[in-house]
Image (tube, grey):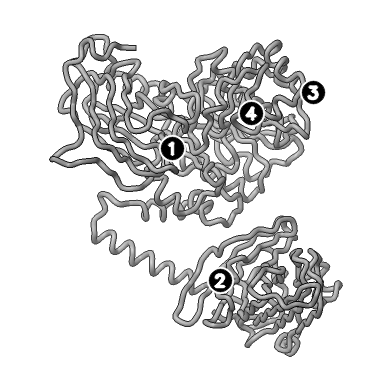
Amino acid sequence: MTDLNADLTHQYVAYPLMGGERYVSATEWFPWVDLNLGKQVSVRGFELSGWERNSEQPPLLTVMLSENGKDWLPVWTQPYHKFSCEKYLFVDFERTFVGQYVRLRIDGYGKLDFSSLNILFSNPKNDDKQISSIFNKIKKEASLSKLVLSTLFNESDVYLNQYINNFLAMTPDNVFLVLNFPKDRIVPDNIKSKNHRVCIFNGSVNREKWGHTLLLGHIEAFQKAKEVFPDFSYFATMASNALMVRELDVISSIAQLDINSPVPVACERAYDLDIDVDVLEPTHHGTWMWHHFRNCSGLGEYLHDQIKLERVSVTQIEGLFASRQDWQLLEDRKSLLEGLAPFISFENFLALEEVLPIAIFRTFGSGRYTHICRVLWSGTREVTVDDLLTMVPRLPEYFCSLKWFDRSASARSTIAVTTEWGRQLLDLARKKKDFDPIERFQASILARQLVDQIRDQEKYLPLTMAWWDTEEKANAGVVFDFKNIPCQRQILKLDILDEKVSKKNPAYIYMEETGLVLDVSISINEINQSHTNIRIACAAQTQAGDLVSGVHLQGYLYLSALCGSTVFRINISKDKCHPPEMLSRTVLHDEYNYRLINAEFVEKNIDSEILYYVCNAAHDDGQVWLGLPICSNGIAEISLSVEPNPNLICRTVSLKV
């Protein structure tokens, strides 16, 4: 390292300025502060004092330099969640860089809060790195390079179209996509020749969620890329539930390689204890995987003796970006990686695709890699529209993708980045600078008019339109009174349709297991061919016959329109639901999974509230159900309707808004 004090000629006291006591940014995604040093100097390091952060904000920092205030080169990062620095940080860079602008960035959500920041620099020397020369070299390399992305794909054909649309819209012409299908899956004819930048092939590896087969699948894609796109220079592994959220910046991705961070920069997950683990004596700390690793008899010895790895690390595979030469090292060892099969067991499952690539890069290759996908590890949650509006505009430039996305073709966040109109609306909503006030106003009015027109086309029918063949039966409806029912996790079928009409029951009760004895009353009937009226009431007592006070969940009433994928609309009039929050535990069921879910959209009026839920069928002939909570001492009276679906077979009625 450079002896920073040997020839130090300047110390730029950046903050506090103007007599202020502290610098405190807004609480937001990736807050930063930019400093102008006034001239080109050799930046040697920095000193940060009085650094404050709350317990939920990890100490993730990056320093970037620029000559022009536009092209920013990352020169130092602190990527670990467990960091010894508390309030004072002194850093001297391993290399000095000539620049004029300095940026200090928090790598996550939080605020930048400190009492003083000093930039340490000296007059430029001949051997100091010029930011402009580094960038010119990177830009030239990026313009001459081709990048291949690899995705192991096992989703629906509908989502396949969206995935490819998203890729083509968010990547430049020198980026290509290889999709590895399962070996027996038919490639749709309309997709085969969709675009010359996309290649779909059937891999030969039987891929499993755990083990080494996902890594082998990516190696297959690497081999296919060499055949189809022979002159590529970089390769990155992506995921089918990770989508592009902005255009891939090859320049920033290459620039990030020299930061040499062993763990993903700006990562919500702590990998601190998962780096450089001895294969023969794995740690007892860190990720759950090390416990399974230790239980796989002979695995460490195989890695040590056959693959020649003494240490391995765990990090994410999503968006792992490295040179072709480094990825070639994995292909060269493909037969050795296949030899891992005997050490894989169902009981001690492993995600070896997160372990072996960077271990091989660091042991036998350049050790230069980065990640162009940001995974939302915090809460392990799906990407929301709010993330697209607030997080994405402030992401570091090398991030182009987020995970996890809902792989449903109708999920709002998915639609927002996989359709042209969705991306245009996002761009319009995120456009804050250089937007003429009159243009902004007119765009806002236009958007409202278009939305009003779209909403006018929404037509809703009673949920029960496929249940009964006459209006008389529908108006009369059904009433079910269950007395002294034990709440023991059983299903109560509601006899409504003959099996000749449908083998799938449109209504049933699924009880919890509270051990109480229940009286449950349910009435279902149509009102004016516009909606279905539902009333649910429940009382509970103990096995000894004592009444139970308080409102407690006892089960769910599941209802289906028998029309496949469905938009459900619940209208709750004021004072018709007690307690008012009872429906906050609504569930959706698609024949396979039960999901507790919040409403997609809520309309609040003076005397009512309308909740919208969307549920996609699991397959073409599948059905979906809306689960309404049944609570002891709770009463719910609601109207329920669904938007018509081409699959809905029902009485002929006049559609009403």
Q: What SS does tag 4 mark?
A: helix
Q: Is residue 340 left or right of residue 3?
A: right
Instruction: Tell me residue 365's x, y (percent).
Output: 54, 14
Numbered mark located on residue 581 in the image: 2
The answer to the question of whether label 3 and label 4 lie on touching residues, with beta carbons closer than 8 A, is: no
Q: Quadrant of residue 589?
A: bottom right
Q: Quadrant of residue 185?
A: top right
Instruction: Name the foreground residue: 244 vs 142.
Output: 244
Q: Looking at the rendering, in which quadrant would you find the N terminus?
A: top left
**Mark 4 Cα shell of 10 Å, populated few (<14), some (14-19), many (≥20):** many
Residue 338 picture quarter:
top right
Amino acid, disc 2: Glu
Nearer to me, 608 or 652: 608
Q: Residue at x 74, y 59 (%)?
A: 591
How many C-alpha atoms fall within 10 Å of the one at disc 3: few (<14), some, or many (≥20)? Answer: few
- In the rendered image, residue 613, in percent from the top left (x then y), is placed at 59, 66
Query: Which mark sits nearer the N-terminus, 2 or 3?
Result: 3
Q: Give the spatial CA distance, label 3 vs label 1.
A: 39 Å
Location of mark 4 (residue): 353
Instruction: Report which residue position mark 3 lands on.
Output: 342
Q: Amino acid at mark 1?
A: Pro
